[in-house]
Image (cartoon, rainbow, N blue to C red):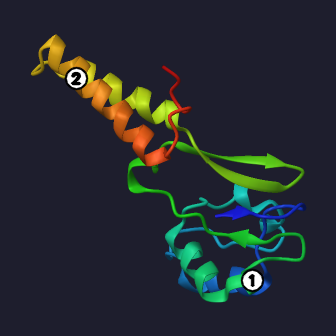
């Protein structure tokens, strides 16, 4: 979830109420005061709040926000960031961090010879280029 307008990430009172009704018993309740800068109070991928936002649509946002959901491919779930300027946010997949993580795993694989490691690393880069649709991502 991210805020797609200038202002600040936050939820409507209705969204907060629905979230609190559905949250696990052992978790803290959200309040409107917490939620003016709610991105610091709730995981942006919290499945309960994501469902609330899906159900409420624009009514999930407060006066200063327009909460949107960005689907991130599973393989990038740990490799993205939310960039913000004056409250307006965008989701950025960190391709370089993802690729580095994958290549490090390949290079640590004791079951692979050096040639196989290089071949797999290059294949990983090619797959990412294809996914991204741009060869500029990793200039040769």
Question: Height in image: 112 above or below 67?
Answer: above
Q: Residue beneath label 1, please?
A: 58
Q: In the image, 84: left or right of 27?
A: right
The quadrant in which residue 126 appears is top left
Q: Position of residue 35 (x, y in %)?
A: 78, 67
Quadrant of residue 23 in the image? bottom right
Q: Secondary structure at mark 2?
A: helix
Residue 49 vs residue 31, the one in the foreground:
49
- Whole-Å distance between the Cαs marked 2 and 1? 47 Å
Residue 3: percent from the left, percent from the top?
A: 76, 63
Residue underneath mark 2? 119
Badge 1 density bin: few <14, some 14–19, many ≥20, Cα 10 Å: some
Q: Nearer the viewer, mark 2 or mark 1?
A: 2
Q: Is residue 123 visible?
A: yes
Looking at the picture, tell me which residue is in the foreground, 53 or 128.
Answer: 128
Q: Is residue 105 visible?
A: no
Is 107 positioned to the left or the right of 36 in the image?
Answer: left
Q: Earlier in the sequence, mark 2 or mark 1?
A: 1
Q: Is residue 45 left or right of residue 84?
A: left
Q: At which x and y percent is residue 16? A: 71, 79
Q: Residue at x 68, y 84 (%)?
A: 57
């Amino acid at each position: 979830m991210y805020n797609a307008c200038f202002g600040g990430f936050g939820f409507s009172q209705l969204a907060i109420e629905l979230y609190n009704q559905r949250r696990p018993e052992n978790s803290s309740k959200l309040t409107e005061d917490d939620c003016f800068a709610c991105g610091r109070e709730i995981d942006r991928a919290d499945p309960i709040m994501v469902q609330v936002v899906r159900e409420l649509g624009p009514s999930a946002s407060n006066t200063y926000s327009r909460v949107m959901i960005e689907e991130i491919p599973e393989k990038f779930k740990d490799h993205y960031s939310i960039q913000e300027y004056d409250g307006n946010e965008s989701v950025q997949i960190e391709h370089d961090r993802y690729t580095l993580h994958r290549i490090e795993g390949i290079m640590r694989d004791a079951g692979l010879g050096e040639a196989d490691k290089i071949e797999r690393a290059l294949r990983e880069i090619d797959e990412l280029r294809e996914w991204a649709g741009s060869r500029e991502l990793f200039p040769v």
